[in-house]
Image (cartoon, rainbow, N blue to C red):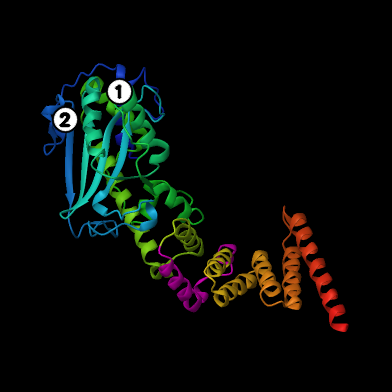
Amino acid sequence: MDEELLKRFEALGIHRGFPLKGNAENHTCRITQSIETAFPTGKFLEEYLHSVFTLDHVYRSGYLHGKTSLETNPEAPIYAGFVNSESSISHTQLLFLDVETSSLSPGSGTLVFLVGLGYWTSAGYHTHQVFLNEPGDELSFLAYLDDWLSRYPVLVTFNGQAFDLPILNQRFLVNGIRSEILKRPHIDVLTLARRLWRKRYPSRRLAFLEQEVLGFTRSEVEIPSWMVPEIYVQYLRQGEIQYLPGVFYHNEMDILSLAGLFLYIENLLNNPRTWNGLSAGEIYGLLIEMERQNGNIENLIAFLNAMLENFERQQSDTPESAHLWLTAGRIFKRNEMYSQALACWEKAAQMDSIDACLELSRYCERNRHDLVNALAWVDRAIKILDAQPGPFHKGHFTMLSQRRLRLLSLMGKRRQSNAT
């Protein structure tokens, strides 16, 4: 944040961590400048008592958010695993949602004062921002939002499960509105991002991922999230509109980045053959996500076959790579494709995966009745364990030793049986 901007905020009494005196609900609204001055293309909705101000933008075909296009076929169904539904859901049935609040700590006195909504039509991707201009008319603001929410079967958020939806539901309850917002089908992109980028990136914050994944950098208009609540309070206290455009910009970029990340992840899940440039950790996350969501298994198997043929040189000998091959082998096994499963486990075993050695030992014993090789794989696992002792060494060693003794016993019984 630029030092000059910080000084201007301080002149208004806005400081990092500045404690508000009372709740935003209790502040008397003394607006001396019209919000329409800051947003000439926005409008008040007269039927909602002049308390609801809206601002709209349309991002048409060709718009790139960083290096990522927000263009999609609105009528095309979304990735089937995203929503547990008997019928397919199209992109036009999604409503992207992000809220700004009067406090960073959710509580009974925290207001939702700005809600960004995003949706697709044939004209492109639309953002519709709804602003609470008069806290005393919050009921009108929420009634308008509830009407919007009811039009779309599926909500899409970033951390909405923990923040956006509960706080909106709380405001609905306080105002006597019976909302089904917590029961609605919901896609939380943060959950997907955590599974996909848990090991690759140090942060899964939206602002971080939009730079690293989407290649998008926000302009100097951006207001950091920690300043947003107090800028709203200053608007209510003094009618200060100078920094509101930055708040609206912050909210709108969240809605755009949310859609961009959604499309990016959806494309990966729909097109596994595009995974070539991804890290082993990312591919592992996608495999787990596709399996968890019961997605397109045919696509997944086709990708895994291609990975066996082409990806060997791209995957380094790391624990993540070993885990990837181990998981790929288990997916092949569940689909009764044993030759491919063995090939994957052998790759993982070459990277010192004890679990892969055990899978190979079990297969040799149960499927081939080959006790000699079953024992050889257990010995290989023990050798790997001895070279890399850790906190679970004792438990692993006990299990492997017991398996080794059992195999030796079976081999002895087989020799006796053959002798007679």
**x then y, percent, for residue 20:** 37, 21
**x then y, percent, for residue 190:** 41, 47
Q: Secondary structure at mark 2?
A: helix
| Disc 2: which residue | 35
Give the number of marks. 2
In the rendered image, which quarter is residue 225 located in? Answer: top left
Task: Tell me if I can see residue 132 in this picture.
Answer: no
Q: Which residues are magenta?
A: 296-322
Labelled disc at residue 5? none
Near-viewer residue (312 or 123): 123
Q: Are marks 2 and 1 in contact (CB under 8 Å)?
A: no
> How crowded is the residue under tag 2: few (<14 C-alpha within 10 Å), some, or many (20+)?
many
In the rendered image, which quarter is residue 1 located in? Answer: top left
Q: Is residue 52 left or right of residue 256?
A: left
What type is the residue that disc 2 sits on? Answer: Ile
- Is 310 covered by the magenta stretch? yes
- Is 195 covered by the magenta stretch? no
- For marks 2 and 1 on the same chain, the one whose residue lies earlier in the sequence: 2
**x then y, percent, for residue 149:** 26, 38
Q: Secondary structure at mark 1?
A: loop
Near-viewer residue (101 or 366): 366
User: Which residue is found at the position 34% from the left and 25% from the top?
Assistant: 173
